[in-house]
Image (spheres, grey):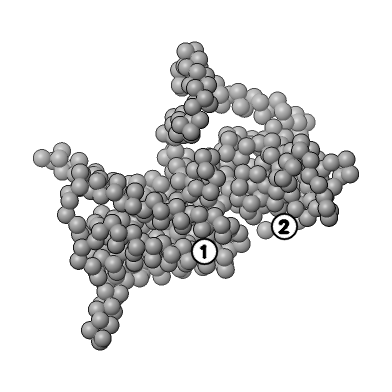
Amino acid sequence: MAKVNIINKLFAAGPLILLYYLSISEIDTNLEKLIEVFSINLQIIIIYFWIIKRPNLMGTGHIFLAGLINDVVMGFPLGISSLSYLVVCFVGNYVRNKSVNTTIASDWFTFLIALLFANLLFFTLLNNFSEVAISYAKIGYNTFFTLFLFPVFWLMFNLYQISFIGAQDA
Amino acid sequence: MSVSRDDFSIAFRSALLQRGATQKFSIFSLIIVALVVFFLDVYGFTVVKTARSFINDVVYRVTYLASTPTRLFPGINQGIASHFNLKKENEELRQVIERYKSLDLNLEYISNENKNLKKVLDTEDVKSVSNIVLAKVLVDRNSPFLKSIIINKGSKEGIIKGMPVTQNKYLVGRIVETNYLSSRVLLLNDLNSRIPVTFDEKSTQAILTGGGTRKPTLSYLPEDYEFEDGITVFASGKDGIFSAGTPIGKTKYTGEVELFVDPNQLSFVTVNLIKPSKEIF
């Protein structure tokens, strides 16, 4: 019984572990060796999906910390990724409060809003308060591919949720 | 109308201020904390700088450890890439099989590391060996926005901002951030990288500009300049940072420069302890 409990807890902690691992490890979602313009922001997809589906698995404190770690590893000013992740969290929380049941289509649409708000804040702060120059084309590609691939990850995370955590939505 | 406005404000407030069993902090409070941290970092207070330097050192080490699986199985990434190029994959697999026959993974890793170190020592100027620091690349996470690497040497070894970084005497980039035990190197292909260069028989002067892509481009050239393939580009040294004559790459007819050192394949680099004549950061 205790063993089953531990396994369940591990599965439940999976999304958070993945979020931390993506923030701290060298694994990147910028496959420019294959396609030069391809890059996605997987952290934002993870946060948005799990905040909508299972907010109890994705503590805001952890999201804040993952953002800080990401800033250190990527060389951005501290707190900027945390802010953009928290904006995604906020939109996710709002959507969850306002909707009874969500579908892949509704999540995709609301994710667009979350992504736009998060990226707008991220790049506005970076542009105005930091000396780091960023290519607008890269931002556009990153936003496009993140949005475009959201349904794919939605299906994968949903499958994970049904298989390992339980089918019931938040 | 007033009911829908109430609904909106309730959902809005709840999303911003809600706390629960696992949500120990409200999003609002964390946003305030993040903003404070951001502005403290941006406006560079000494305490924050010191704290950041310490955090950087710790996080880079943890990142290096966390990335161990990807280092131990470097074939994984290549495998994905090779799906798009079966011929290349076939060749690589043959090479891998050959290597596996003679060496086990551990031995191969250590011997490669040894080989690289020897290569670096052979190619660097022995007379000036006291002016260089050999560093290992800790993190080379490929961000879509910033092209930089983290090395395992910092201010403890005398590294300061602006110092040039080379590999086999070819220019790789420059130091843009130093911590006690680690440093960040801005690569030549980063959007923020601008290097004065010289090339061809007429010693044409230009600026090598990173664009965030694999190949940086040459700009600020004489009017109607026509590019030729295969001309070696050198650092001109006019910025007082890079030694004049450090080779960088070869020109392409498109105005791009094919770098001698692939920025995605760095494992060891050397930091030249040349004090920049001016602070440009």
The structure residue drawn at horizontal position 29% and vertical position 79%, both measured from the top left corner, is B9
The chain letter for the residue carrying disc 1 is A
Residue A132 is situated, as x and y percent measured from the top left of the image, at: 59, 59
Quadrant occupied by the C terminus of chain A: bottom left
Q: What's under tag 1, amino acid-wise?
A: Phe
Q: Quadrant of residue A136?
A: bottom right
User: Of the numbered discs in the image, which one, if any, rests on residue A123?
Assistant: 1
* Position in image of residue A167 (x %, y %): 17, 51
User: Residue A87's spot in the image, x, y percent?
Assistant: 39, 65
Q: Is residue A24 above or below residue B10?
A: above
* Nearest to viewer (mark 1 / mark 2): 1
Q: Are marks 1 and 2 on the same chain?
A: no
Residue density around tag 1, few if under 14, some if 14–19, many if 20 or more, within 10 Å = some
Whether A164 is drawn above or below B69: the answer is below
**Chain at numbered mark 2:** B
Q: Residue at x 64, y 47 (%)?
A: B189
Mark 2 sits on what residue?
B279
Q: Is residue B125 left or right of residue B193?
A: right
Toward the viewer: B273 or A81?
A81
Horizontal side, residue A147 vs residue B142: left or right: left
